[in-house]
Amino acid sequence: MKLAILSREPRNYSSRRLKEAALARGHKVKILDTLKFAISVEEETPRLYYKGTPLAGYDAVIPRIGASITFFGTAVVRQFEQMGTFTLNSSHAITVSRDKLRSLQILSRHDIGIPQSAFVRDKEDVLRAIKEVGDTPVIIKLLEGTQGIGVILADSVPIAAAIIETLQSTKQNVLIQKFVAESKGKDVRAFVVGDRVVAAMRRSAQGQEFRSNVHRGGTTQTLQLDTEYERTAVRAAQIMGLRVAGVDMLEGKDGPKVMEVNSSPGLEGIETATGLDIAGTIIDHIEEQVLFPDIDVRQRLTVQGGYGVSEFTVDPKSDLIGKTISDSGLREKDVVVLSIDRNRVVIPNPKGTREIMAGDKLLCFGKLLTLRGIVPTKKPRPRKKTTKTLS
């Protein structure tokens, strides 16, 4: 294969390791400066120029897009996608994961633990937002911050309000999050490649520092994740649409809390802590994907008029419960069950003898008219009761 690594720092540890791993497997590879590209947008003939020369012939691209160049960097990745080149992480997934607020909003729709968070613009809402996340101490984050920069711990309401007001006065967008005290300056970094965690480490802050980032002086140690943390990391990466991701989690008293899903995770810390060849694992994954590329089932199948894909949970009162897929009548109605998610275990391409149970999450393809009759109607969530204090 001919590979391109998009990076502004060719001597960076991660860029070097990826190039070494690719060369060791007999591939051709170049590290290309992301800002040296020019994009040509024309009907049916998308083109890229690198340092003024037309670029073509690459089988795969590994984006290492820094936060400071996200807009242009993802535009370059998107152009490679338009040209039919496989990209390790898509432009859309990189863009979504870079936005801390948007990431949390997306994760909040799924069974994924996240720290309670609030985002406000009006200073009159600051006090309410702090109380909403559980009162002080709180973590205040810049939405565009990386490597622990722009993360502040405020241990009182006046200090938190002053910090937020100061940051907002400089046109910074800030996120207020619950401080997970039981994590005690530690977090977990799970490195996801494809559909599995290939390595994990615990990062610990030093001295009075509460940020555990390696760039802030944090120490690392290898870690064997339990099933819940591993499942959370893989699902978080998949929800973000990332094939390779560093998923940072706090160890809360009620389980993992996802802080961030990083689309360009560094290799130095994880390889040093675990002694594993993570770069080689990434190249192996690219080889598999270029040979057998992922297909967006929902996008491909909905091209046919009147057909689509739907995912729904089987209601306890459903007539499907207790029946096998063959006896359910779904196939006769032109509906195919693609997979069953049962108690967080996915059963792909289930056999006709598989029994349907209450709580199963079915991924089905078929006639939209039929699917509408099967999918249970969503019930409105009950509003939280609020106690008003009379003064």
Image: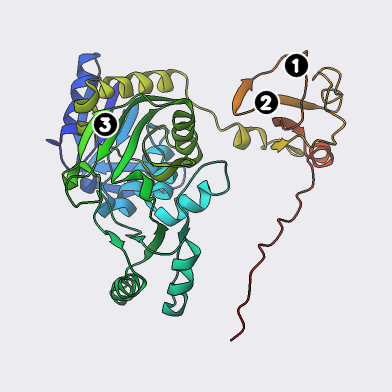
Q: Position of residue 158 (x, y in %)?
A: 33, 75
Q: Please, is residue 269 above or below residue 109 in the view? A: above
Report whether residue 256 is seen: yes
Give the CA distance from mark 1 to mark 2: 10 Å
Give whichever of 209, 253 is nearer the camera.
253
Give whichever of 380, 47 is nearer the camera.
380
* Mark 2 element type: strand
Q: Is mark 1 in CB contact (under 8 Å) with mark 2?
A: yes
Give whichever of 90, 128 is nearer the camera.
128
Q: In front: mark 2 or mark 3? A: 2
Quarter holding the N terminus?
A: top left
Give whichever of 10, 153 is nearer the camera.
153
Q: Residue at the location (50% across, 34% down)?
A: 235
- The disc, 2 or 3, on the residue closer to the chain's N-terminal end is 3
- The disc, 1 or 3, on the residue closer to the chain's N-terminal end is 3
Give the CA distance from mark 1 to mark 3: 45 Å
Judging by the rendered image, the residue that carries numbered circle 3 is 4
Q: Position of residue 52 (x, y in %)?
A: 20, 45
